[in-house]
Image: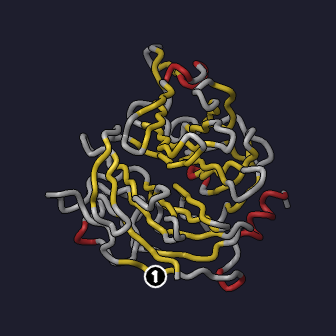
């Protein structure tokens, strides 16, 4: 049996074979902006800064990034693009910044936490043979469909073309192109990258690794930061992993086909939250508030741990929905 497949089978063990981690669902945690019944069209991400403030991207004109307090009450909206499909908040010696992939504009941005953009990587900075394509008429256009990004300990920026060909681009801290890997030509366990929805730098390991949520193949795996040495975490029993976050030795995963899962550093699932097995209620943005059930997810799309190890999950939903589980 191939080594990667064996590792995956060993990793996806039952909860009874692992030290289960327990959480309590917190109902009605997140408020809404003034005058709104829901937060708005959700097709993005959620993150928490070092002060505990919660940031949620909303795909509506003028909505920007909504900011909430630790108590879940709306504070303000940052003037950032409406299509921040994926973003992270990272702290460095220079300060704390939001790094985002703007799906609708196919560019990367770095912004202060007040929404001031301090750097961007424009579409023409990507290698022409990866970021351009010809249509049926022979016209060359932009083929990038950027879905997420993260920043390595040395400042290198990783950006994934998750709705395109799943290329993973690497730029230095100043936005200069360095390399590209992944995509339709690199094989992991016999399969090319497909709808690699989001990627994250996993600093639980030394040296850090790149986590790939390869949703089209319903699997998640690590790479070294140069794109080599694939290490499978799981490729069976998943529900289309879409986003992830780290706290201590744990990783939480938003699975768009109806589950939030929590994994140990060793690759064992230690908690399963909000499971939805109702036909037609997962992997869709159309579940209305009337059909939402307390503590049951629909289409998990973004996820984050807060600073205390509690879990916040945002859904792909035209009304917008955020759920919270507190660590026991």
Q: Is residue 78 visible?
A: yes
Above or below: residue 140 compared with residue 264: above
| Residue pointed to by mark 1 | 24
- Point out residue 167 in the picture as x, y percentages from the top left corner: 61, 35
Secondary structure type for disc 1: strand
Q: Nearer the viewer, residue 136 or 128?
A: 128
Is 58 placed left or right of 275 in the picture?
left
- Point out residue 30 in the picture as x, y percentages from the top left corner: 31, 67
- The residue positioned 64% from the left and 30% from the top of the image is 172
Is 173 placed left or right of 62 in the picture?
right
Q: Is residue 183 visible?
A: no
* Furthest-bottom residue in this view: 16
Residue 156 position by quadrant: top right
- The residue positioned 58% from the left and 18% from the top of the image is 128
Above or below: residue 24 compared with residue 48: below
Rendered-image quadrant of the N terminus: bottom right
Q: Nearer the viewer, residue 91 or 85?
A: 91
- The residue positioned 43% from the left and 55% from the top of the image is 46
Is 99 placed left or right of 184 in the picture?
left
- Point out residue 190 in the picture as x, y percentages from the top left corner: 75, 47
Q: Nearer the viewer, residue 226 or 213?
A: 226
């Amino acid at each position: 049996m191939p080594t990667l497949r064996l590792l995956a089978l060993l990793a996806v063990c039952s909860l009874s074979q692992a030290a289960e981690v327990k959480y309590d669902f917190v109902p009605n945690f997140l408020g809404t902006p003034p005058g709104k019944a829901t937060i708005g069209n959700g097709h993005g991400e959620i993150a928490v800064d070092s002060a505990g403030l919660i940031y949620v991207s909303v795909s509506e004109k003028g909505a920007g990034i909504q900011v909430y307090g630790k108590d879940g009450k709306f504070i303000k909206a940052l003037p950032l693009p409406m299509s921040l499909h994926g973003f992270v908040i990272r702290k460095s010696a220079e300060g704390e910044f939001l790094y985002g992939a703007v799906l609708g504009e196919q560019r990367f941005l770095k912004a202060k936490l007040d929404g001031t953009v301090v750097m961007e990587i424009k579409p023409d900075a990507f290698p022409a043979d990866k970021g351009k394509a010809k249509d049926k008429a022979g016209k060359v256009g932009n083929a990038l469909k950027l879905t997420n990004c993260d920043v390595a300990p040395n400042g290198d920026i990783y950006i994934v073309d998750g709705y395109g060909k799943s290329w993973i681009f690497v730029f230095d801290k100043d936005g200069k192109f360095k390399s590209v890997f992944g995509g339709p030509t690199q094989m992991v366990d016999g399969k090319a990258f497909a709808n690699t929805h989001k990627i994250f730098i996993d600093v639980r390991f030394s040296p850090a690794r790149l986590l790939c949520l390869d949703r089209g193949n319903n699997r998640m795996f690590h790479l070294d930061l140069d794109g080599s040495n694939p290490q499978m975490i799981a490729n069976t029993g998943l529900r289309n992993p879409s986003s992830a976050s780290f706290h201590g030795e744990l990783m939480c995963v938003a699975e768009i086909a109806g589950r939030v899962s929590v994994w140990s550093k060793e690759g064992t699932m230690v908690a399963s939250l909000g499971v939805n097995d109702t036909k037609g209620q997962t992997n869709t943005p159309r579940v209305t508030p009337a059909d939402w059930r307390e503590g049951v997810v629909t289409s998990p799309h973004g996820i984050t741990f807060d600073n205390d190890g509690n879990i916040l999950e945002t859904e792909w939903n035209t009304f917008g929905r955020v759920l919270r589980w507190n660590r026991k």
